[in-house]
Image (cartoon, grey):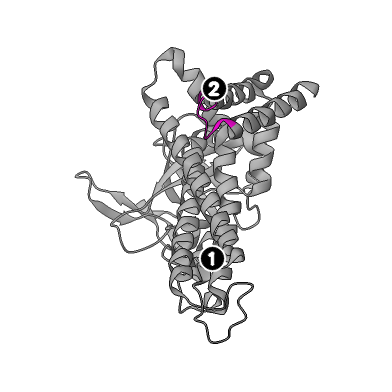
Amino acid sequence: MCLSEPQAGSSLADIKTRAEPQPDGSYRVFGNKMWISAGEHSLSENIVHLVLAKIPGSPAGVKGISLFIVPRHLLDEQGNCNEHNDVVLAGLNHKMGYRGTTNTLLNFGEGKYKPNGQAGAVAWLVGEPHKGLSYMFHMMNEARIGVGLGAAALGYTGYLHALDYARERKQGRLPGNKDPHSAPVALIEHTDIKRMLLAQKAYAEGGLALNLYCARLIDEQRNALDEELDRISSLLDILTPIAKSWPSQWCLEANNLAIQVHGGYGYTRDYNVEQFYRDNRLNPIHEGTHGIQALDLLGRKVVINDGANFEQLMATILQTSNAASGDVNLSEYASMLDATCLTMEECWFSH
């Protein structure tokens, strides 16, 4: 997905990449794209870029954006990679973490390669002109859930490493033990270590549960009957920005706590938890920052159709808490959840 540009970042209304129509119905793309994960590498024979660009004369802002297919190599009549398209790697971004994937700046149409004898990256329009952003969001929304799931996975693996370390590492004695000759206890015996481990567990398992629920909704959406489709789509719409943003914030905090459990060792590369933190630090940023997700949630997903998405979410939560209220071990938590939902509904209807 080639969305961002060096001068525009997340402000897609300001992209400058252009797509010029050709007599044969194709287009030639000219411009620069940045932050393209795996935009160039040698692991696959071909790379197919999906590029946001504007056709000359299009409306200003996001309403003038179209979506184009731009392969790295053009194919011959047998479907084999043939001529190199006019797409080149301009540079790699040297990242804090997430180093298993290249992150690239790509130039389209600079003339290093001249397919069919002329500069410009050969491209084909996807769907209708000026609807590129809506098409791209079919992938963006799933990618956002994937970001949240990746954040939860990194938070969880950091927790498991911290748990193993706390069980094995002997250090200090419990309060009240004044005997310097007594054996040190495992870190996990200390109250503050327990606090940090339990916080990591809550963040990671909560984020994982939320994203698995959203992944299930995606599966159900693809196979739902008409009477269920609206309900599923409504839930997925309102949960997607939350599923991206919440785990990427709090599972990063879980990684922070994993380093803290390790103490000074956690700040070294002798242990993996510092890498988990560096890798996870990207997740609050890419596929839309916390601020962008908040704007999407409150500016669109909550208010659309007079709050229908919000009401569907509240109804689903209350249905679940009602089912849990009959369990003696869960009834107290169900009552707390009911109270929170009612407060949120009151806030919504008061506005």
From the viewer's side, name the closer residue of 332 and 152.
332
As drawn, is 14 to the left or to the right of 155?
right
Task: Tell me residue 240's x, y (percent).
Answer: 55, 37
Residue range highlighted in magenta: 322-331
Kindly identify the amino acid type of the residue bearing the numbered disc 1: Ala
**Does residue 213 belong to the magenta stretch?**
no
Tell me the distance, in whole angstroms, between the alpha carbons under discs 2 and 1. 35 Å
Instruction: For the C terminus, give its image quadrant.
Output: top right
Which quarter of the picture shows residue 38?
A: bottom left
Q: For this view, does 37 lie left or right of residue 301?
A: left
42, above or below 227, in the image: below
Image spot of residue 188 (x, y percent): 51, 66
Q: Relative to 25, is 43 on the left or the right? A: left
- Residue 325 included in the magenta stretch of the image: yes
Residue 319 marker: 2
- Residue 258 badge: 1
Give the residue type that dot 2 points to. Gln
